Amino acid sequence: MGQTTTRSDDDSNPSTERTADGADPSTKRTADDADPPRPPAPGGLPLLGNVYELASDALGFYERRAATHGGVVRYDVFGTESYLVTDPEAIRRILVDDHDRYEKGAMPRDQLGGLLGDGLFLAEGDDWREQRTAIRSAFFREQVAEYGDPMVDHARRAAASWDDGDVVDVHAAATDYAFDVLAESLLGSDVERERETVRAAAESVTERFDTRRLTSFLPAWVPTPTNRRYRRRLAALRSTIRDLVAERRAAGAPANPGEADDLLGTLVAAADLGAMDDDRLVDNAVTFLFAGHETSALGLTYTLYCLADRPAFQRRVRREVAALDGDPAPADLRECPALTAAVDEALRLYPPVHSFFREPTEPVTLGGHRVPAGVVLTLSPWAVHRDDRWWDDPTTYRPERWLRDGAAGAVHGDDAPGPAVGERPEYAYFPFGGGPRHCIGMRFARQELRLATATVLRRLRLEPVTTDLSVRASANTRPAGPVRVRVRDRPAEADDGPAAARSPVGGE
């Protein structure tokens, strides 16, 4: 089963009760804090634990457990003890305040090690710090702004390829777009000729981590047909990247990472200076291939889908970007609060990364509960972003919640993607993680999503065709089927007035 934008009527939320000082009781310290209780352990099957519930609807499982049992609750996968964490204060402690007491841990490495190796995503300690230092110049603000031209150019080409009345699968189109941007901006145009290798590997990654399949909870070395295909296609991808690295070196790599024009050049220069070996170079290239185009494609898909279903707000964004002097540039984005709100709200309602994982390296107390060392902690943006303790009408797309009145009209705190306007904890919104290990590509992704959306809406109006979006948990939060919109040549504003009455995702 997939997830839609509407929560079932019988989903209760007893954890919304507050103490006299307004605090959530799940986060309060108690008199016997020296020996706090273990988190509640919802029932499951012997040996299997909660595997069947996760396989049938992992995202719904997270929502129901959080609503019924509070901010820290236990679940089990084949006997492996895990804890779902949806208390924003506990999440902040894990990611920020006490981050040095946590690591990615064995579970992500067991699941993703064959894909991402020892790259930045899974590295720990000094190895992680050295890799991040070597790579970060590719994501400095000034360098990210340089990527603005290809982001706009490829969006312009995509919009030009659609005729008035065409029905477009925006997920397929967004995936092609994000790959094109990544090829030119981060890995160089040479990767374009290997599109089919990357596409096949991405397909196998999605299949391998689709939680609707019970086999997705098994290690990758188990010789299922899915796992064999996954390993074969991943090996082909890694071989392709090694060939690209060799070609880059033969053409003359820059002397230091800061002089590189793209991420591949940064990685090659860092390896040549001894900051990482070639295996880690390839690991990081694979990491950014998937993190860079899969998650961006999903974010753009959900933004365009949501705006198609909110014609009045779509019109507001279109008016905003139409007032620009030509197609948008990164510097223009600060003048587009409605555009920024549209993207941030889509990332709230449909976070491309539905879960982050950590393991405590020592016993800790979270949300008033005792948590032993070495257990898997699942930090779920999906569940937190849809929690009515922090969000009014949480399953409705309401970009207005991000805007407030300023001296010159509506404003949005650009480059500070949360919290939204209102009183709520900071980590009630964390689509890019947080703390020292937040997504290094956050600035790149947010710029890409806003520039692409603005470029499309300067030319076209979007009408919904898919009206009941269902999503599923795989490596990311993926649509369960095509996401279709109808494109119309941009009309005079009076022409799309009647369409504003229709809003199946939410009222105006």
Image (cartoon, rainbow, N blue to C red):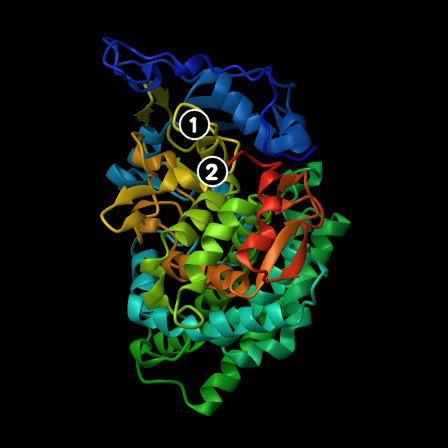
Asked whether residue 142 is in view, the answer is yes
Disc 1 is placed on an element classified as loop
Rendered position, 302 above or below 259:
above
315 vs 98, nearest the viewer? 315
What residue is rendered at 44% in x and 66% in y? 280
Rendered position, 85 above or below 499:
above
The residue pinned by badge 1 equals: 392
- Labels 1 and 2: the sequence-earlier one: 1
459 vs 359, nearest the viewer? 459
User: Label 2 sits on what residue type?
Assistant: Arg
Residue 325 in the image, given as x and y percentages of width and height: 39, 71
User: Label 1 sits on what residue type?
Assistant: Asp
Choose top left, top right, bottom left or bottom right for residue 157. Answer: bottom right
Q: Are marks 1 and 2 in contact (CB under 8 Å)?
A: yes
Report whether 94 appears left or right of 147: left
Report whether 383 appears left or right of 305: left
Asked whether residue 221 is in view, the answer is no
> Which quarter of the figure is the N terminus placed in?
top right
What residue is rendered at 28% in x and 17% in y? 23
285 vs 294, nearest the viewer? 294
Residue 143 in the image, given as x and y percentages of width and height: 33, 72
507 vs 471, nearest the viewer? 507
What residue is rendered at 40% in x and 85% in y? 253
Residue 376 in the image, given as x and y percentages of width and height: 46, 34
The residue pinned by badge 2 equals: 398
Choose top left, top right, bottom left or bottom right for residue 252. Answer: bottom left
